[in-house]
Amino acid sequence: MAEEKPPLTVVTCTAPVNIAVIKYWGKRDEDLILPINSSLSVTLHQDQLKTTTTAAISRDFKEDRLWLNGKEDDIGHPRLQSCLREMRRLARKRRGGNGSSSSSDPPPLSLACKVHMASENNFPTAAGLASSAAGYACLVYALAKLYGVEGELSEVARQGSGSACRSMFGGFVQWTMGERDDGKDSVAQQVAPETHWPELRVLILVVSAEKKPVGSTAGMQTSVETSRLLKHRAEAVVPERMAQMARHIQRCDFEAFAELTMKDSNQFHATCLDTFPPIFYLNDVSKQVISLVHRFNAHHGKTKVGYTFDAGPNAVLFALEDTVGELVEVIKRSFPPEDNGGPFLKGLPVQGASLSDELLTAVVRDPVPGVIQYLLHTKVRPGAPGVTDDNAESLPLLFTPG
Amino acid sequence: MAEEKPPLTVVTCTAPVNIAVIKYWGKRDEDLILPINSSLSVTLHQDQLKTTTTAAISRDFKEDRLWLNGKEDDIGHPRLQSCLREMRRLARKRRGGNGSSSSSDPPPLSLACKVHMASENNFPTAAGLASSAAGYACLVYALAKLYGVEGELSEVARQGSGSACRSMFGGFVQWTMGERDDGKDSVAQQVAPETHWPELRVLILVVSAEKKPVGSTAGMQTSVETSRLLKHRAEAVVPERMAQMARHIQRCDFEAFAELTMKDSNQFHATCLDTFPPIFYLNDVSKQVISLVHRFNAHHGKTKVGYTFDAGPNAVLFALEDTVGELVEVIKRSFPPEDNGGPFLKGLPVQGASLSDELLTAVVRDPVPGVIQYLLHTKVRPGAPGVTDDNAESLPLLFTPG
């Protein structure tokens, strides 16, 4: 085969964050990232929360390199290596190799080249906003485009970060835990597209952008080792909740959807507390938000808002479009904003609402100023991760020589 | 039978608080107060925490009356009525009646008389310090003395407040859940006397004397109705923990005792969080205490301190006598006392300790001043509730006419 100098090949992709309504917590295989239970999530719109990744291959690159949010990061991370290795294997396979690294054919040139990758979130990393899910989904998608790999990619994304597999689809997505030891059946699939339930809105209350005290990887490992309640949840509770949640979504039954979402969030945090030493992701502000939601629903005599919390204190609230105006006003009264240089409400516009005295008396108690940094109003995302056509989005760091 | 004017008969008793190390949460029978799982507790010394109850009968009393902490209270409370009815039934039975209210014999005069009762705690009521346990244990004990009833009383105390049955004994006490529908086998018994483990010390960190947001009666009822994890805990986890805990106590194995105590406290609070709507008894200060204990143990490379929390934010710490000095110093450094008009350390004296720089660096982080009101240092109580010989302890309110 004649030598040729391959062009610099660059692709820029974006991928969305997803928020689980049936939570994933605990692995049965640490290397392949196989979970102890299935999970179900809502993919959020990229206009508000997204990861952007630019990936490039070039003969001029001496080694694989990675930049995260503008700073070079460790390329040797085992999970990152898993994704790279797996994508290169799929690329070889697609080009007629057998996918095994023992193939005697010389590799195609793009596979002989090193890759540079740069990834950026438009939201705080590691604040419990599922940044690693969007990050690995984006990385895998970008590498697939670069190497021309098509087909099922959620299984590869899963090996970067478990929940990343769910960010490979828009709308409502379930990650089936699977049964096989090799993880081939532990993949994500769409339960319903975003168009199925266009009224659903998501309001993220950013309580703190601090790093969480116990990372979710270490946390869930300790939970699996020590929590009897987690084992019971995974074996006996989640299977029926998965079926219920899919049904509630298919029927657009908001009350049932929101109630089960709240219960499952609470149960996840309960298993964290049953871990030894115990793990706390909810703080006093999180609890105030929970109490507020229950008072709001009690006042209305129906479940109009649901909450869920991941591995951090930020609240993610679900509501239908026609509730958001009132809800935002109640939040503003309960957690009066303090000027921190930015707008309190970000994302989709919200229609103002006036609150009745009855509602104020019943729902707004002991306002706590300044504890919520801002609100992010968003909705369910359509479609899968995508290649961006906007060259301005391409991240420049890649082209650092080396 | 000739009429006679019975003398005013008065008795004053005291009863202790107990702290569960295997927690009771949830009833299978609300009226008889039959639990969904067995529990095990440590009875605390009365020198620091006790209830005093004076009870009197007189022909001059027109109706049964009750004073709690100096204020007249509702005598019609169903649980109070249960205890009164049951004690009078036992008194009739003892005097040759068949114990049934349909007996045709005229009742003895003391049973025809009304009773006045006054009860006082030397600690804040309803702050998660098991005041109702000591209160009902004391009431039942006083009525037994008044009516001359002997024998098994924990079954009666249980009908006032479940955990009260455990305050009927000193030392280490288990409450067997029982199987019978009538509750006759749901009684307390001593696992070991206090003399069995004289080095054990108890340090109570009073975080807040506020009333708890959800009372334990309502809380556990909601938990039974909604928490799948509580059901699993009661059925599958507690039975083996009861056996383990009794063994750890019998062997005076502090590390195992403290670790299981912490795990069971965490699991109880986990089931509260799995309740819908969720119940939170731990606050951010409770969590800081938990983290402190884990850092303290990690620094020493062994479990030298254990924590447990009831239905409130106050921490109860267990340690051996030789650890208390250092522990108290660490707590003072971590939660610097603010002058609130009283001493910071109450109860048993504590030997001062100097802390090494290594320990300070490893254990004391981000001190939070003023959040702990005071520390109460106590130990395990010997013996059962008792009649006090000290007339000065008799509560005067009884003699209010009427």
Image: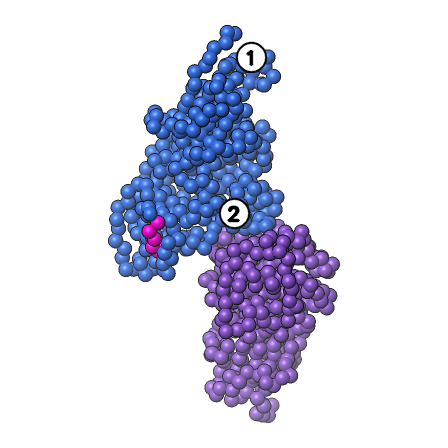
Chain colours: A purple, B blue
Residue type at the position of mark 1: Pro
Mark 1 belongs to chain: B
Q: Residue at x 49, y 46 (%)?
A: B212
Q: Name the spot of residue B309 as percent of width and height, x first.
A: 45, 46
Please provide percent x and percent y for residue A305. 64, 58
State the residue position of label 1: B106
Q: Earlier in the sequence, mark 2 or mark 1?
A: 1
Whole-percent x, y for residue A241 in the image = 65, 54
Tell me the CA gap for discs 2 and 1: 47 Å
> Which residue: 52% across, 50% down?
B280
Q: Chain of mark 2?
A: B
Dot 2, how many residues are within 10 Å of its Cα: few (below 14), some (14-19), or many (20+)? few
Task: Give the magenta part as a residue range.
Answer: B334-340
For disc 2, the marked residue is B213
Q: Residue at x 57, y 48 (%)?
A: B275
Is residue B322 shown in magenta? Answer: no
- State the mark number for residue A258: none
